[in-house]
Amino acid sequence: MKKLIRNFLLFFIIFLVIAAVFSSFTDQKGKSETVGLETLISRINNDEIGELVVSGDKITATLKDGKSESIRKEPNESLSALLSNFAVDPAKVAGVKISVKDESGWDYWLANIIPFLLPLLLVGIFIFFTMRGLQGANSRAMSFGQSTAKDFKPDAKNRATFKDVAGAKEAKEELQEIVEFLRFPKKFHDLGAKIPRGVLLLGAPGTGKTLLARSVAGEAQVPFFHMSGSEFVEMFVGVGASRVRSLFEKAKKNAPCIVFIDEIDAVGRRRGAGLGGSHDEREQTLNQILVEMDGFEPTQSIIVIAATNRPDVLDPALLRPGRFDRRVMIDLPDLKDREDILLVHARKKPLSKKVDLKVVAGRTSGFSGADLANILNEAAILAARNNKKEIVNEDLFEAIEKVMIGPERKSRVITDKEKKITAYHEAGHALVAHFLPDADPVHKVSIIARGSAGGYTLKVPSEDRHMHSKSEFISEIAVLLAGHLVEKTIFGEVTTGATSDLRRATSLARSLITDFGMSDHLGPRTYGEKEEMIFLGREIHEQRDYSEKVAEQIDQEISGFIKQGEAQAAEIINREKEQLEKIVLVLLEKETLEKEEFEQLVGPKPAKREAAVSVD
């Protein structure tokens, strides 16, 4: 409809332009007054005419007073014959300047052909645009099954390289082989080596899977075809398979190249999963991908790179040798990697000389590369809103909390009682976390509402850890329960503010038993096996590999772990009541406590207990 309206407007504008030109010509020619032959004869007899110009069947008479008149005569009759027929005195004619002018091409076209050509021209233009619109619709219908992959040609200005990817050292080393194969395939073929046809990038969202794939293409300087898994599937059966064929045909014409399929789990889920897990169009698309990956010639330099954060739901046929048999794991960045990522994203941002990105990296444990980029962007926005010329530490720390928890809600109106309850609640979290050696250090305590939280206690681990002990989990449960216990101890009853803490503590205690095998009574085994059964967006199936009696024991063990954490928290709260009151007074006054001021109030954090080692 939009295209039809646009064509109509264009047609209308062309019509107005031609009409304006034609009317302009007509106006110019219409300046002479048209009179009859009798007037011409009368004026000649009265010596009123100074000049006569004959052009075809038209006579233009210029009067002695400067006026101009037009007279039409018969086409085949000469002026002299005309004057003779009217018995004009030759002496009168001799006093008039007479000239004969050949009719010009411009006058001929405008006067004779345009009146007939103009309607035909306008109709032709209208038909042309109408047919072109119909052809466009037909071509779109015919190209419905064609690939919609985005083609990124190697360009020195915008191509990504491994220098643009901070961290992920092992992943870059693994992908370096792909780069060498694409640049120097002959040395591999001469030795009979076959490079993996498919590379599967695994990692949490935001860890840089797409950027890594683009950097491989940039390093190898080959075309890069990017398509999301969801772009294959349409409402019409067979379109997805057709697009797969089109994509690989395009790749073969541009070999050597890289085909990147993002979020491949959209079409690569396990087939025949049952309710909600099967879709004819998706399965046909997956089948076509499997066929195309098997159909490569041994010497074809086409590498298929796919990315997903759900490798557990992929069909086994995708992961067998000859397809995606090389898997590259991209972990969340550690402290040094986070600092390098921050440096990359801070290149075009004016940072204050006092900013130490290592400190920022230390406060962002567990953040992905995308989270770190978002932190610097939010810090830049905060600095701009405050009319600063540089980004300072306060902007970065505020951005970290905004990304982790949400924006501050200073306008939220709370009563003095709610403010006091929040202060005791957060002081309890901070106090227990500080005095438990296995808990993470407290970096900030605040009773300012942020996001959905009425207040928050920010704990940051002193070092990156990949393994956690049972004592650390129990300490975490104790910290989560501390706010609930303080409310009950000070006010004699609890509020709904601890709902989230209780839910997280219960979930952690269940994981200790069912996932980590840390129960002393139930032994080192896991309980329950979750299977991906999505219906209306919810997981509705969990296979229970244990009896009802064991389920009852699991509930008892969960309660036991929670009571154990509760006992640790209660012991610290009762022992350090004086310190608790100090924290509450400062929070009610200043609303926020940073790490240095907090440790000045309660003293340094106790050292972590080292496990005893016996030597025989």
Image (spheres, rainbow, N blue to C red):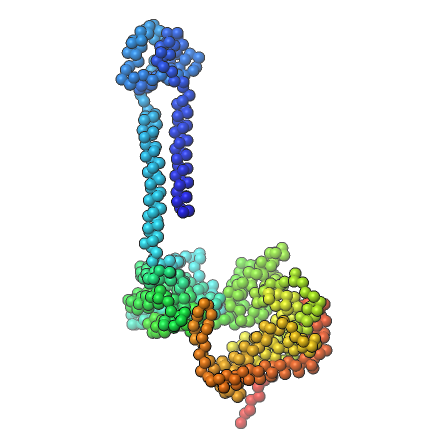
Residue 501 in percent (x, y) is at: 59, 74
Tell me which corner region of the image, top left, top right, bottom left or bottom right, holds residue 68.
top left
Of all residues shown, which one is farthest toward the left?
Answer: 76
Between 56 and 218, which is closer to the camera in this rendering?
56
Residue 108 in percent (x, y) is at: 32, 26
**Vertical placement of residue 404 versus 151, above or below:** below
Of all residues shown, which one is farthest toward the front?
Answer: 548
Q: Residue at x 43, y 72 (%)?
A: 533
Q: Count the numbered circles shown.
A: 0
Residue 259 in percent (x, y) is at: 37, 63
Whether residue 213 is visible: no
Between 137 and 68, which is closer to the camera in this rendering?
137
Tell me which corner region of the image, top left, top right, bottom left or bottom right, holds residue 156.
bottom left
Of all residues shown, which one is farthest toward the bottom?
Answer: 616
Whether residue 34 is visible: yes
**Vertical placement of residue 595 versus 123, above or below:** below
**Vertical placement of residue 380 versus 62, above or below:** below
Tell me which corner region of the image, top left, top right, bottom left or bottom right, holds residue 58.
top left
Q: Residue at x 40, y 31 (%)?
A: 19
Residue 478 in percent (x, y) is at: 61, 79
Between 100 and 21, which is closer to the camera in this rendering?
21
Q: Residue at x 62, y 81 (%)?
A: 566
Q: Residue at x 51, y 77 (%)?
A: 466
